[in-house]
Amino acid sequence: MCASGRWTDGADWAERADAADGADWAERADATDAAVARSADRQSRRWFAAASAGFVEIVGSCPRDRLTDPALGEWTLRDLVGHASRAYLTLEDYLEAGRPACAAGPSDGRQDSHRTPEPTAGRRPPRLGSPTAYLLAARSGLADPTAVRDRGRVAGEALGDNPGQAVARLAARAVALVARTSGDAEVLTPVGRMVLSDYLPTRAFELTVHGLDIARAVGRRPPAALRVALRPALHLCADLLSGDDRMTVLVALTGRAALPHRFSLV
């Protein structure tokens, strides 16, 4: 008798309860993941907006008669502004490259010297799951100093006689593009595929750091918007640290020792 009804029913009930608990747990986990993704997307958009506003402001304040002054390494001020402005151009181009071929719209007539080619047939580019993954891959695969220098110079010349106005137009176009694009939109970069919400912080990082470079080059205090962008930039720097570099930076930040000569994360 014991083995007939109640025990079997009880085991079946327990099995159903376990399955329900498992499904409920999975549903809650999915909801948590989605909430985290939405929060990260909002944060990346806020950072990009702040960095962009600060960058436009500092570039607009640069005296035109100083555009040929030395600014950073081999770059003049114009070169540096040009290099940093590519953050907007690559955002547009890599989003377009990530769209399905059937969804690609007509060209807007811009120069295509910086466009990303489609991957070679049969070779799918790797998936990059974070801003850190992109920056590390780019540091390994896109960091040829001569090529970076020359692209900056070409981009600087393309800004014309009034770089401030040209940069403001690029920024407005990019900000509008981000506003109408989902955070999970595909982005195809030269080093891999990723979603917009992960790529956007890398553009904000460029604008933040080079906005500070430009402010220093012209002897001006960074705009308030750039100062707002500092916290997420520092968080991303912390994520880029690995191994002994974490200890090196922590020791330096707490006043125990200076950073090694020419120490850099990028």
Image (cartoon, rainbow, N blue to C red):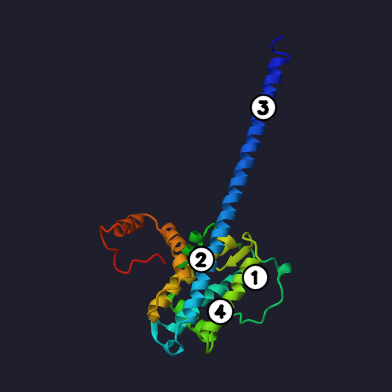
User: Which mark sits nearer the N-terminus, 1 or 4?
Assistant: 1
Give the residue displayed 62% in from the left and 60% down from the top.
183
Residue 34 visible here: yes
The label number, if any, that marks residue 202 in the structure image? 2
Return the residue found at the far top.
1
Kindly report the distance in space between the C-alpha atoms of the residues bearing marks 1 and 3: 49 Å
Q: Are marks 3 and 4 in contact (CB under 8 Å)?
A: no
Choose between 67 and 261: the one closer to the eye.
67
Q: Nearer the viewer, mark 3 or mark 4?
A: 4
Q: Nearer the viewer, mark 2 or mark 1?
A: 2
Q: Are marks 1 and 4 in contact (CB under 8 Å)?
A: no
Residue labelled with disc 1: 96
Kindly report the distance in space between the C-alpha atoms of the residues bearing marks 3 and 4: 62 Å
The label number, if any, that marks residue 15 in the structure image? 3
Classify mark 1: helix, strand or loop: helix
Quadrant housing the N terminus: top right
Residue labelled with disc 4: 168
Residue type at mark 2 is Thr
Classify mark 3: helix, strand or loop: helix
Residue type at mark 4 is Ala
Classify mark 2: helix, strand or loop: helix
Kindly report the distance in space between the C-alpha atoms of the residues bearing marks 2 and 3: 47 Å
Kindly report the distance in space between the C-alpha atoms of the residues bearing marks 2 and 1: 17 Å
User: Which mark sits nearer the N-terminus, 4 or 2?
Assistant: 4
State the count of labels: 4
Q: Nearer the viewer, mark 1 or mark 4?
A: 4
Relative to 26, say whether 71 is above or below.
Answer: below
